[in-house]
Amino acid sequence: MIVFVGAILLAGSLNFFLIPADVFASGFTGLAQILAELLPFFTPGILLFLLNIPVAIIGWMKVGKSFTLYSFINVAFTTFFLEALPIVHISDDIILNSVFGGVIGGFGAGLVLKMGASSGGLDIIALLLARVSDRPVGMYFFAMNAAIVMSASVIFDLEKALYTLLTLYVTSRIIDTVHTRHVKLTAMIVTKKPEELQRAFHSKVTRGVTRIPAKGGYTREDKEMLMIVITRYELYQLQQIIDEVDSEAFTNFVQTTGIHGMFRKDD
């Protein structure tokens, strides 16, 4: 369902905002737009599908079968909606089209990434680089797309390339807002049931736990503080575990700016 919604948003951002304003989208979608200008007998939707075939093979080998399957389904749906949805001129303001096209397209791509797939093309390459370095996906997304757009500026108008860079910046920021796997949190849990919580964490979250002796300042009761570093994705699951095992536990969540040492990234 998320793949379906993401495809509609991606296609809508193109047909309602970017294509009418002659602004290029990100990734292989933008590349398909560029090629469609040079090869008018192909539509952007068909070119997008063809460009993603070799990337799907790379994703199958390097990322995983489920990820690649859902990504390719998203590309297929996006291709379908690009052909099915009409091109509508909503506004003549090129800045409005660039910004709103970037917001809607970024939200669609971010949703798809959040559920463990991608919108195909450069998204797969950016995701692979982000997993290796543990940096935001949007950073790689923007850098690689900026290189494509600057190359396109040699062929097309430089002003068009600058508006496209605006779209890419907005898209990358929205993706990093929606897709938050790179964000780390440290949870410090003061509890009377450290053994039960540790077993639950190891069985359901699969993260290392550091146990620190603690004493209640008011009650003078002996307790323990469990410290665990998680991704932003795992926060809801961790809260559920704490509520089930020890609903009286006191938990402090703080954002972690960096990690040095062993931390499982490919989850």
Image (cartoon, rainbow, N blue to C red):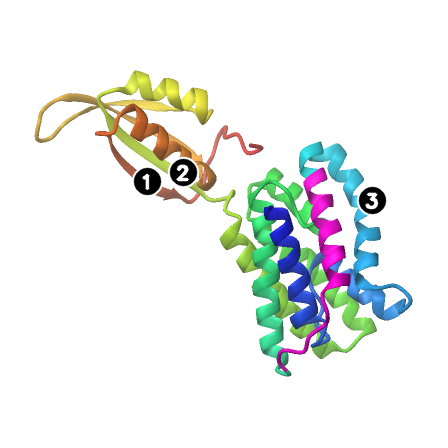
213 falls in the magenta region = no
> In this rendering, which labeled residue sits more in front, label 3 or label 1?
3
Q: Please tell me whether the stretch drawn in magenta is mainly helix, strand or loop.
A: helix
Q: From the viewer's perspective, tell me whether residue 197 is left or right of residue 266.
A: left
Q: Which residue is painted at 56% across and 57% down in the image?
A: 107
Residue 175's quadrant in the figure?
Answer: bottom right
Q: Given the image, on which type of amino acid does mark 1 rest?
A: Phe
- Residue 121 point in image, percent of width and height: 74, 50
Mark 1, residue position: 253
Note whether residue 140 is visible: no
Up/down of 63 relative to 195, above or below: below
The span shown in magenta is: 69-91
Q: Residues within 10 Å of mark 3 (few under 14, many from 20)?
A: few
Q: From the viewer's perspective, tell me whether residue 61 is left or right of residue 255.
A: right
Towards the viewer: 52 or 223: 52
Q: Given the image, on which type of amino acid does mark 3 rest?
A: Pro
> In terms of secondary structure, where does tag 1 sit?
strand
- Residue 36 point in image, percent of width and height: 84, 66
- Residue 223 point in image, percent of width and height: 20, 22
Mark 2, residue position: 235
Say whether disc 2 or disc 3 marks the residue closer to the N-terminus. Answer: 3
Mark 3, residue position: 54
Quadrant where the C terminus is found in the figure: top right
